[in-house]
Image (spheres, rainbow, N blue to C red):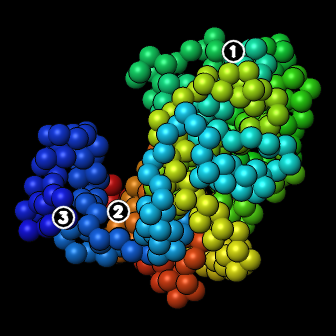
Amino acid sequence: MFDYGTFSFESKAQVLEQAKKYWNPDKTQFWTDAGVDLVIDRREEYFLWDMDGRRLIDMHLNGGTYNLGHRNAEIMAAVVEGLQHFDIGNHHFPSVARTALAQRLVESAPASITKVAFGSGGGEAIDIALKSARHATQRRKIVSIIKAYHGHTGLAVATGDDRFSKLFLSDRPDEFVQVPFGDVDAMEQALSAGDVAAVIMETIPATYGFPLPPAGYLEAVKELTERHDTLYIADEVQTGLMRTGEMWGITKHGIEPDIMVAGKGLSGGIYPITAAMLGDRAAQWLDQDGFAHISTFGGAELGCVAAIKTLEITSRPEVRSSVHEITDVFAAGLARIKADHADWFVGIRQNGVVIGLEFNHPDGAKYVMRELYENGVWAIFSTLDPSVLQFKPGLLLSRELCDDVLERLNVAVGKAALAAKAG
């Protein structure tokens, strides 16, 4: 019997059966067929335990949600203390918690950012960003990148890959235009008519496998947006919060975006909260009609408490140093593994602890993912390019755990190469 207090299950098999019946049959079956029958039970720091008792080192972190580890003790303590004062709050009124977090986010952000609007999920924060850009420019068209991913809500899903937008009849080529990543000429052509409200870009596209922007590319796009009176939206949901070795990845390019979006790790992995950080022009609607976007759970006060503590931990000098040390350890270790498997392991995409591993097979990352799972590590293939494994070390990994992961990866890469050849 697995007793979780307010509910219980007799077995893992019962969970899988009822997940198909009541939750998501296709996704549940997909993971079973993929050889990843994971149902997470206990979780602590950078470890997960399956209901069968298997321990996994978490190198997925749910897209960076667990940058500071699962059930981080400091964040949990802050939320428990916050419960003495706060609950979700009332979204209509000024809030001490929302005001405190908004101030800290603005202070952490590029100088162009002056206001914050809150959501409960990343897609909602992207929707706020897009609506803000449309209001500011009085234009409707949005330009994004082919194979982009910005969430699944109403406007956000239209900016991403058509696998998701077409399913819900959200593909609108007259309003949502996509161009290839790294192609400045295509971006210039998309903006040349002067009718684009915003360009939205992940600083490093995550679901596409973390392809690194060519030198000068993001800077060139920012210059184009300024030339054509278009707003630049930096999606920092997966590259923000020190994952590139800076609080916000976009600052490594010297860019001050008109809008910047944060999510996932902002929650500390404890309480959902996301933010659309707005420059003066993008924030005009907050002066005109502050009720124009309403979100009952956006900026929930307990989420603000978790986010304030998350920002405080993440901004510590020793955490920045930790990220740089982890970056160097993995850069050296991955290069050694790649050299040992040169025909199979063909590329390393790394900026800080944002890492994509390229394999010489269209589904290569799925093979590696499965072998890693068998060898006690959880990492996930890139949905829109399954040849690339998303590899996401936490910000506080110990050197011992880094070395352990690299040893397990070396074994998994070798076994995956054999499995792929066998078909």
Kind of residue indicated by mark 2: Arg
Would you say the residues marked 1 and 2 are in contact, meaning their CB atoms lie under 8 Å apart? Answer: no
Kind of residue indicated by mark 3: Gly
Q: Residue at point 64% right, 15% down?
A: 175
Task: Identify the element where label 1 is drawn.
Answer: loop
Query: How far across and down, in percent of the image, does residue 355 sit?
Result: 61, 62
Q: Is residue 421 left or right of residue 53?
A: right
Q: Nearer the viewer, mark 1 or mark 3?
A: 3
Q: How far, Cα to Cα, is label 1 from label 3?
A: 49 Å
Disc 3: which residue? 5
Graded by Cα atoms within 10 Å as few (under 14), some (14 to 19) or many (20 or more), the crowding at tag 1 reads some
Kind of residue indicated by mark 1: Arg
Q: Is residue 263 visible?
A: yes
Residue 244 picture quarter = bottom right
Disc 1: which residue? 140
Q: Is residue 373 left or right of residue 5?
A: right
Disc 2: which residue? 370
Number of callouts in the render? Answer: 3
Q: Residue at point 22% right, 75% down?
A: 53
Residue 174 picture quarter = top right
Q: Earlier in the sequence, mark 3 or mark 2?
A: 3
323 or 289: which is nearer to us? 289
